[in-house]
Image: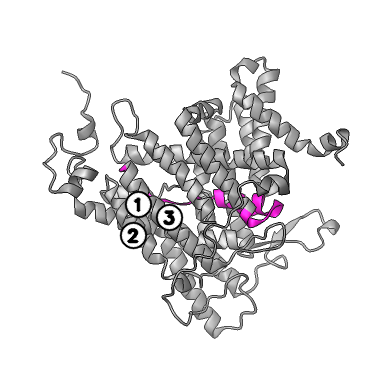
């Protein structure tokens, strides 16, 4: 007798599905997958409340940065853009991909846009590069090159990229909250940053951040669903109370003060504000190409892992371990990046928080209709969502950094040929405040070590090509001098 379990049984679903109750059930295959409308609805709510923090964090990350010309994006318009793109693309993923896989602006990706792209060009130029990234991902899916490029990069180096981005995000959180600050006259000291504003923690806003971090990690340790969102809401309420009764000189970008009204018409002012090729003129062709590559790398590798992981948790993988309709799912994910750029919300991608919905029983794209509908409802709550101070939201960045850091356990630190490139990738990102520099340092170290060990043939030709681009990128100043550009 064979010990092999039926995939349906392994997923906890009946091997003989009951007949569909109606057309909606039949379309989404709800009964066939052993689910029900109640479970799908609960799953949709759980996913939304687990990932709704992006409605606060994305506007804060993008809104706190300035482009090359000193312009900042409007926070209210960013809330609208973030909610709108998440609403539309989550519903499209549900209907087109039939997976309980929500989509929203990607953390890490928005950091690239805010702190790498925008300082080199205008905001429309930066969003235009995001659109190009999404278009190229769609092309890669259609041509089958996406899998080839994925196979060219060692898995452990991909994991190191995620860890490095996690540390970078956490560092941004510490700086934005005022827990860490630059020393004004760093030339007279060997220490470039310090604790608080004066070498120690002072003021109510920093206290709100510290308590928020403690609350967030406590909720995470207890495995409370929606821990990040609960922490943001709780500390925002605390901040509002403190601001009302204490003498707080400044909260930074956002002051926690109750708005005159909670409901307001959404402001679509940022929708469609992108320049497809403006970034190439502002930052230079080579730099723009590398920035687009960075977005592609961060986006589609992250999405691939999320899609496979959520599908596996839901018991939806086939006998070969493949996701049903993976072509459509990957194409929609690429289209979400395009939509994010068009909407000025940064690149959108699949969310690992969708696991919360799967945990509540969601097995189909019907759950996405609920999640997407809730994002649509959020469009009209902009005044309420723009009172969250950085100090209440930044603990979420620390939490996300921790979650991304957990992938470090998959790196073989005893093999120097992978450990050294992984270390450089992880370390260079936060230390240079640059995701691009971290990826480039890791790639160059990897191909160099492989070459000196006589294993050059083990490196995929695509990785050699990308590393050559990074070599020119790092040496751009002397190259320009040799070519007489400067």
Residue 86's tag is: 3
* Residue 45, percent from left and from top: 31, 58
Seen at 33% across and 43% down, the residue is: 96
114 drawn magenta: yes
State if disc 3 and disc 1 touch (CB < 8 Å). no
Identify the image's colour scheme: rainbow, by chain, secondary structure or one colour: one colour
Q: Which residue is mark 2?
A: 373
Q: CA distance from mark 2 to mark 1?
A: 8 Å
Q: Who comes first in sequence, dot 2 or dot 3?
A: 3
Seen at 46% across and 74% down, the residue is: 237
Label 2 neighbour load within 10 Å: few <14, some 14-19, many 20+: some
Residue 48's tag is: none
Residue 91's tag is: 1
Label 3 neighbour load within 10 Å: few <14, some 14-19, many 20+: many
The quadrant in which the C terminus is found is top right
* Residue 254, percent from left and from top: 57, 71
* Residue 297, percent from left and from top: 56, 38
The quadrant in which the N terminus is found is top left
Q: CA distance from mark 1 to mark 3?
A: 8 Å
State if disc 3 and disc 2 touch (CB < 8 Å). no
Q: Report the number of numbered marks.
A: 3
190 drawn magenta: no
Q: Secondary structure at mark 3?
A: helix
Residue 243 or 24: which is nearer the viewer? 24
Instruction: Please report the bounds of the magenta region as a residue range.
Output: 98-124
Q: CA distance from mark 2 to mark 3?
A: 10 Å
The quadrant in which residue 465 appears is: top right
Q: Secondary structure at mark 1?
A: helix
Q: Who comes first in sequence, dot 2 or dot 1?
A: 1
């Amino acid at each position: 007798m064979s010990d092999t379990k039926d995939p349906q049984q392994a997923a906890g679903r009946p091997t003989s599905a009951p007949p569909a109750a109606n057309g909606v059930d039949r379309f989404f295959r709800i009964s066939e997958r052993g689910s029900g409308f109640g479970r799908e609805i609960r799953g949709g709510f759980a996913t939304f409340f687990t990932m709704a923090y992006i409605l606060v964090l994305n506007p804060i990350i993008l809104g706190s940065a300035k482009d090359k010309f000193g312009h900042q994006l409007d926070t209210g318009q960013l809330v609208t853009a973030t909610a709108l793109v998440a609403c539309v693309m989550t519903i499209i993923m549900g209907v087109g991909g039939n997976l309980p896989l929500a989509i929203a602006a990607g953390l890490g990706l928005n950091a690239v846009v805010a702190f790498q792209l925008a300082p080199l060009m205008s905001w429309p130029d930066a969003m235009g590069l995001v659109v190009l990234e999404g278009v190229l991902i769609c092309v890669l899916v259609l041509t089958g090159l996406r899998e080839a490029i994925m196979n060219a990069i060692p898995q452990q180096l991909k994991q190191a990229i995620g860890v490095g981005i996690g540390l970078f995000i956490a560092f941004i959180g510490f700086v934005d909250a005022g827990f860490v600050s630059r020393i004004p006259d760093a030339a007279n000291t060997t220490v470039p940053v310090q604790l608080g504003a004066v070498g120690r923690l002072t003021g109510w806003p920093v206290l709100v951040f510290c308590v928020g971090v403690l609350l967030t990690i406590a909720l995470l340790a207890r495995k409370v669903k929606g821990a990040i969102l609960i922490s943001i809401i709780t500390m925002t309420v605390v901040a509002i109370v403190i601001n009302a009764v204490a003498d707080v000189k400044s909260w930074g970008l956002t002051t926690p003060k109750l708005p005159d009204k909670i409901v307001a018409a959404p402001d679509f002012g940022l929708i469609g504000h992108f320049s497809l090729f403006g970034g190439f003129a502002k930052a230079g062709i080579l730099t723009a190409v590398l920035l687009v590559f960075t977005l592609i790398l961060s986006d589609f590798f992250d999405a691939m892992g999320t899609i496979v992981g959520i599908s596996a948790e839901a018991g939806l993988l086939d006998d070969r371990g493949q996701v049903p309709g993976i072509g459509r799912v990957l194409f929609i994910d690429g289209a979400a990046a395009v939509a994010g750029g068009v909407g000025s919300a940064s690149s959108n991608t699949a969310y690992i928080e969708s696991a919360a919905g799967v945990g509540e029983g969601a097995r189909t794209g019907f759950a996405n209709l609920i999640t997407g509908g809730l994002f649509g409802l959020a469009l009209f709550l902009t005044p309420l969502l723009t009172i969250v101070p950085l100090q209440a939201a930044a603990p979420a960045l620390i939490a996300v950094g921790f979650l991304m850091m957990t992938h470090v356990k998959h790196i073989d630190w005893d093999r120097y040929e992978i450990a050294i490139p992984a270390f450089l990738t992880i370390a260079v990102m936060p230390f240079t405040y640059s995701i691009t520099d971290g990826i480039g340092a890791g790639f160059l170290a990897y191909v160099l070590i492989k070459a000196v060990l006589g294993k050059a043939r083990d490196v995929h030709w695509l990785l050699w090509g990308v590393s050559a681009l990074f070599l020119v990128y790092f040496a751009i100043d002397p190259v320009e001098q040799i070519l007489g550009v400067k």
